[in-house]
Image: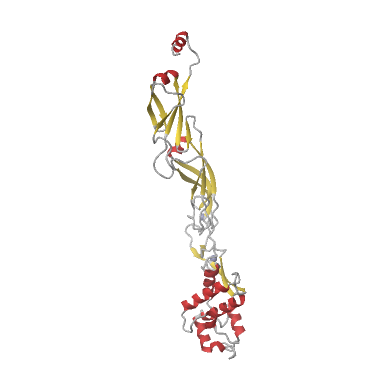
Amino acid sequence: MSKDYYKTLGIEKNANQDEIKRAFRKLAHKYHPDKPDGDEAKFKECNEAYQVLGNEQKRQQYDQFGSSFDQQGGFGGGMGWEDFMSQARQGGGGASFDFGDIGDIFGDVFGFGRNSRRQAKGADIQIDLQISFKDSVFGVDQTVELYKATKCSKCNGNGAEPGTPIEECKTCNGQGKIKKIQKTFLGAIQTATTCQDCHGEGKKAKTPCGKCAGTGISNEKERIEIKVPAGIEADSTLRMSGKGNAAPKGGIAGDLYVRIFVKQDSEFLRKGNDIVKFEKISFKQAALGDKLDVKTLDGEISLKVPAGTQPNTKFRLKGKGVPYLNSSGRGDLYIQVEVEVPTKLNKEQKKALESFS
Ligand SMILES: [Zn+2]
Ligand SMILES: [Zn+2]
């Protein structure tokens, strides 16, 4: 049985490697058995063709023997087709294949192979932070001390006892990963797993650091400054990227989540971005009018209460409320007056009031 690999891939005899790759990729997508119109037999044929044509050396041999090479009794030194393919699949012997390239192709097409290594990530941490009402309005910088997995202070995170060298990892020869050829129905596929010895770094300390045992991380107290933005709402959570637990070498640190609790204030009440403050005035002040000294978050102000002010009247102080979190400007402050009705009156006062009606 003769096999025309060029025909299989639908390309010209003089196609270059790019064209071969492209053709294979297209057909591999089309015939992949996981696809609804997949065709395993055709998929295998394309794979076989690509394994030969996608390799310059093998392609030359194939071109020399043409599509009738198996009828001529073999490949090179008397090897039959099956021998050739079986050696090729195992990546050994005379038929030496560039499996790295095949791994690349399959990695690209099917999402495995090249980028199979997942980066280690440190655990996230969640803490609670209580702040005052005023700090929630204007923002505040708070420093907290956390006992957490952090970059080892003795070796500065490189895992080596200070003054000792870092060497190439012998387990993976500095590659950081261990390559394996797996036999699947697609033929031979190369997979790479992260070297457990060096965690994918390709190098490791000759003498591991005594404090962190070579991991580069140790449990230490760390001071972290938390910038609470002006206008933050109660029960919201700040995410501080990379401030969680450190990961072993080569990994990325987790995140720190800070949940903000705002203490209730006895004077101020937040309503959206506005603030309401209740201010008691006397019956006389309400009736005759007065100037009040009112404490606000921005300091004391003078508020003119006109004569005849009704209970629960609100006076608006523009722009003295809560800052908008993600834009400029502030809400408003409302001073709401509560009129105190006198409970004890002497005779003259009673008389004076009765003259009203
Ligand atoms: Zn250390
Ligand atoms: Zn290694």
Name the foreground residue: 128 vs 65.
Answer: 65
Using the image, determine if residue 107 lies above or below residue 141. Answer: below
Q: Residue furthest front?
A: 357
How many numbered dots are placed on residues in this image? Answer: 0
Left or right of residue 35, residue 267 in this image: left
Q: Quadrant of the N terminus?
A: bottom right
Q: Which x, y percent locates residue 110?
A: 55, 68
Q: Residue furthest top?
A: 347
Residue at (52% x, 47% y) in the render: 257
Q: Quadrant of residue 184?
A: bottom right
Name the foreground residue: 261 vs 349.
Answer: 349
Left or right of residue 308, residue 50 in this image: right
Is residue 355 at all visible to an observer of this figure? yes
Q: Quadrant of the C terminus?
A: top left
Rendered-image quarter of ligand 2: bottom right
Q: Residue furthest bottom?
A: 72
